Image (cartoon, helix red, strand yellow):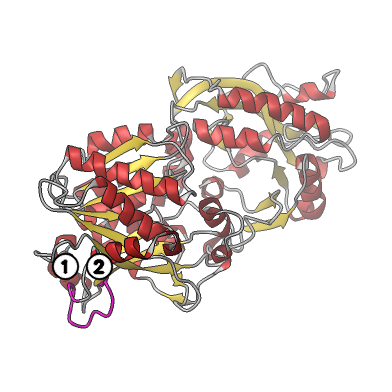
Amino acid sequence: EWIDYHLGIGFSHFYLYDNSDEFDIGRGWLDSRPRLHQKVTIHSFPGIGMQMEAFRDCASRHGSEHRWMAHLDADEYLVLRKHSSVVPFLEDYCEPGAISINWIVQSWGSRLHYSPEPVTKRFPGSVGVDGIVKTITKVDALDLNGIINPHFTLLTENYHQVDTDGNILDDALETAQRARNNRNLTNVASVYHFKTKSWKEFISKRERGRSDLSGEEHDEDRAVKLESARNGELIDANREDTSPWEMLKAVDPKYRFFESFSDDNWSQINLKHDRYGPAICCLAANDEAYIDEWADYHLALGFSTIYIFDSSDQYWMRQWGEERRSKSNSSVIVKHYPGDALDPLFKVSALVECLSTAHVENRHEMFLLLDVNDFFILPETDTVAEWRTTTSVVTIVPPTLPKPCVISRIERVVFGTGGRNVFDPLPVTKRFLFRVHSSQASLPPAVVLHIASGSFGNVTLHQLKELLHFQFLPTESLSSDRSNRMLRMMCPKNIDSPSTTSNHFQNAYVHHYLRSKKECIADRGVNSTICHMHGTVEDTFGWEQMQFYLPAYANYNGFV
């Protein structure tokens, strides 16, 4: 978004200095965007307090290729008020040597966490103009032996740092004062600073610490500001200012689809709440970045209700759940259930609680137990249209099940990391198109519970808990008698089709997305070997299915 925006207003090239230890941005992000290959250069630049050195290196290494250079962070957007492009703006105002532009700080907008929409759209509320400036400099005027600061630069003789009224700013007695201009000029240009974004994103930012400090100073500053962020010390907006979002839509029309994206998706989803229809129980942990795509897909597929148990201590998904429930006629229900989502025992207890809660509120006859990186897939036929009209989630459950059949299982097909290291704001089903060969990665199957209408039948909650223990915990932890009893409650081999060779569904399966390496490690723990599997077998069916059910998602194809 940040690059598209600044390309749209006339910047010609971007030098990204990746401060991560593992060259996160350099692994996968640019490779997946051929349209940017000639516009973006990425350098690995790890270490603490490296911002000034990165700017100096950029000016020394690449300055001779350009007439002007701007030092901007990825949460800063230059808005021009009298020019359609940055080049005529600089020709008009940067001739003295460097032009300084005041910040306008955007508010957190009372948003609790990240959502997969443009930053410029998510935060329309403004705190107002700030005295701090960002500076664009003529390369010929740079003093590479002096201070290169994110807010100002030292210039060679006869050049000056000015504002848009022509006031000279580099005659301040103290060099640091050049980082401010208390005249607060905004009539020609402003740099909009999305300083906090959401509350959870702000905490993550403070956990990293400042990029221009090192040593004890860095650690002390980080501790103070992190505590402040965790305490929710955020500044609310006092007015609305959508200038960056309006500019983005004007210079790059592909972003306009976000204006109606949510409504377009809801128009494809049947919102008739069916208390007896198939439902999903899910334990979520830090899944805010993925939950919209996952919920959209499964509601469009025909599930009547999705129950999500948020395991975070802070109940981060509360706001999302309230907004979704109001839109979806109670088709999405979020509950708070704090605990360690990596602990299998906790997961079992959460799912049992989910089943109990869901069954009290409604009378679903089938529950599918999924994680947010699981996508339930129905079989492919000759054409997508034929498949769409002949197969639905309702038809996969046999009308009668031998007693006491309670559980069926669905094979999980694992999709690898694709060599990507970190999160990318494209849909998961689009980002990861290569599955891991079944001989290399095998995960436990997904679980379907068949429940008699109106009650749990002869199966008590205690027995359900035992069944789930049997599914998620090592079988050697159970006695042979208990194991045999659990096996008798599994659905027989022939409930799906005559060719079935196990008690798995044969006319449906689950795509399980590891996502990127670091996302996978966050899900599974640092010692998980499966997080290093890239995937070798191309399989685009999940992404094709997503676009068919929810055509608005096809707009994401324009972003690569």
Q: Is the magenta stretch mostly helix, strand or loop?
A: loop
Please report the bounds of the magenta region as a residue range: 494-505
Point out which mark residue 378 bears: 2
Location of residue 175 in the rendering, given as x and y in whole percent from the top left corner:
84, 24
Q: What element carries label 1?
A: loop
Q: Real-space Cα distance between discs 2 and 1? A: 7 Å
Q: Which residue is drawn at 9% across and 64% down?
A: 399
Q: Can residue 257 be seen in this view?
A: no
Q: Mark 1 points at which residue?
A: 391
Q: Is residue 531 magenta?
A: no
Q: Quadrant of residue 166?
A: top right
Residue 87, placed above or below residue 29: above
Query: Which circle's residue, 2 or 1, is located before the other in the chain?
Result: 2
The reply to whether residue 144 is visible in this rendering is yes
Relative height, residue 242 to residue 292 (above, below): above
Query: What residue is rendered at 20% in x and 50% in y?
Result: 269
Q: In this view, does 344 lie above or below 35?
A: above
